[in-house]
Image (tube, helix red, strand yellow):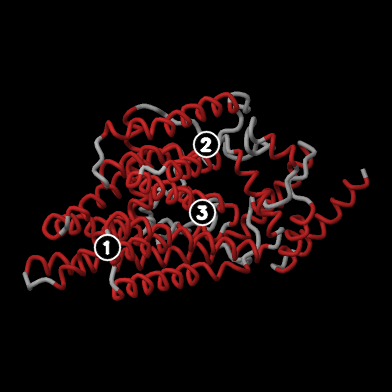
Amino acid sequence: MNNREKSIQILAIIILILLSVLLSVPTIHYGYLLEDYKYLRPYSLSEIAHTFYAQWEPIGTETKGYRPLHAVQYGFFYLIFGGDPVINHIFQIFLFTIGILLLFALMLRCTNDTTAAFWTALTYAGLGTMAWQVSHLCNRQHLLLIVFFFLTIIYYDRYLFNRSKISWLISFITFIAALLLKEIAATYPLIIFAFATIIRGRPIRSQLKPLAPYFLILIFFIIIRANVLEDIPKTNLYPPPFDLHPVNVISVYSRALRGTCIQTQGIHDPKNDFPMYDIGLKSLRDYAGLSAFLFLFIAGIILLFRLGSKKAKRSFVFGLSILLFANIIVTAWYRTNLIFISSIGVALMTGIIVSLIFKSFTLPYKLVNMAISLLALLSFLLYFSINIMVFYEIQWAQRPNGFIALTWDKWDYDEYFEHLENLNIKIISGEQMTLFQEKLRQTGRKEWADKLSETIEETGAK
């Protein structure tokens, strides 16, 4: 690598860091939201141990799951940073930035093309629904999953080149950590397999032995999860029962695929407590986003076949495989804040297309290539602009006085009294309760904070 290439890569890294910070820095003073009050707190050793053989969330009001590292990471980072929301938001920005830079590094390994790597990472950072990961502290595990995802593939790639047992072990450990953090990591072995065979061109048989432990540990995990969740009350319908009829599976898979590709699901309905369940295509913006993506995708495939190198074509197919494999988990329970892995496929394909657009502008003039490239560029600009708009819309709604923050505060407030009355459980207490009351007072709801104080005194006296 010559000095000019190094300078370009350094400049790309600086721009990506600045973009990540600029997108997420408004959230620093957003405080806590919804589950943040329940989970960003100190954990006892018994609570942490409990999550290794039981449902991750002891009250049973959240999504069913076997996620031991949920409690571990909450407790671990609480020991380091404490409960200060500002410090936790700064760490959130740090994780977001690291994830973007790791994607840049992975794409450099795939394509050896700084332009493609830069546009892939930039697109991923600006996708609309990434705002949930940045703004909501409880989604820190999603950012960790992104980091683990890239580390798992990067170190497996190192193993493919040098057969280093250390590289394979690091890849395997990061996969296990991701799997214990959230079930979406179940798709990682399939994606690693796709990487080895598509990007590196390794024979299928050569990957059976090194990848066997990944699939074996996945089977072991599924068995443990099934046993743990067997005792979960049937009244807990999160996620709701899934209809396995082929027509329904195809319909729901297609819906999740569409949602991952366009990511224009902002906040349409002020009466919707959980807008991340929105499936899109409810407004002109949604249709504009879908049209822009389709034009970009079609024009990009034409450019790929006309101008793309073998590495570019392989990387595009790998991005498509990420989208298709990760979308299996998204389909099981569609939420726009759960498409952070399948979104990598969208960003990867987009990055390849945009790099080909700029490449076409440097080639001898050809009317067809120029027309296709201009159409693709305009489609990308529209697509990216809509996503940035949605990003800030989602983020803005989560500020302390934002509509979704006020809605979720009411949900927390009502849920506190509901659990106290029915289960005699204080779902918010200690430092978290103090933070909640302070936020209520700052946002003009002093009577709520006072009622909580009275209730705490009464129940404490009992």
Residue bearing mark 2: 239
| Sequence-first tag of 2 and 1 | 1
Q: Is residue 27 left or right of residue 345?
A: right
Relative height, residue 109 to residue 218 (above, below): below
Q: For mark 1, what is the residue?
A: 113
Amino acid type indicated by mark 1:
Asp
Q: Amino acid at mark 3?
A: Leu
Instruction: Identify the residue at image location x=60%, y=27%.
Output: 228
User: Camera-side residue: 6 or 47?
Assistant: 6
Q: Are marks 3 and 1 in contact (CB under 8 Å)?
A: no
User: What is the distance, in whole Å, between disc 3 and disc 1 at their CAs?
Assistant: 25 Å
The x, y position of residue 336, in whole percent, is 45, 50
Judge depth for marks 3 and 2 and give the one in front: 3
Q: Nearer the viewer, mark 3 or mark 1?
A: 1
Q: Mark 3 vs mark 2: which is more N-terminal?
A: 3
Position in image of residue 108 (x %, y %): 32, 59
Please tell me whether residue 147 is drawn above or below residue 356 in the rendered image: above
The secondary element bearing badge 1 is classed as: loop
**Residue 192 position within the rendered picture, expressed as x and y whole percent measured from the top left:** 36, 42
Q: Is residue 237 above or below residue 284?
A: above
Neighbours of disc 2 within 10 Å: few (<14), some (14-19), many (20+): few
Give left or right: position of 208 versus 377.
Answer: right
Which residue type carries mark 2? Pro
User: What number of labels is visible?
Assistant: 3
Query: Which residue is under mark 3?
Result: 143
* Residue 252 position by quadrant: top left
The answer to which image quadrant residue 187 occupies is: top left
Q: CA distance from mark 3 to mark 2?
A: 21 Å
- Quadrant location of the C terminus in the rendered image: top right
For residue 381, which quarter of the picture? bottom left
Q: Is the residue 408 above or below the residue 180 in the image? A: below
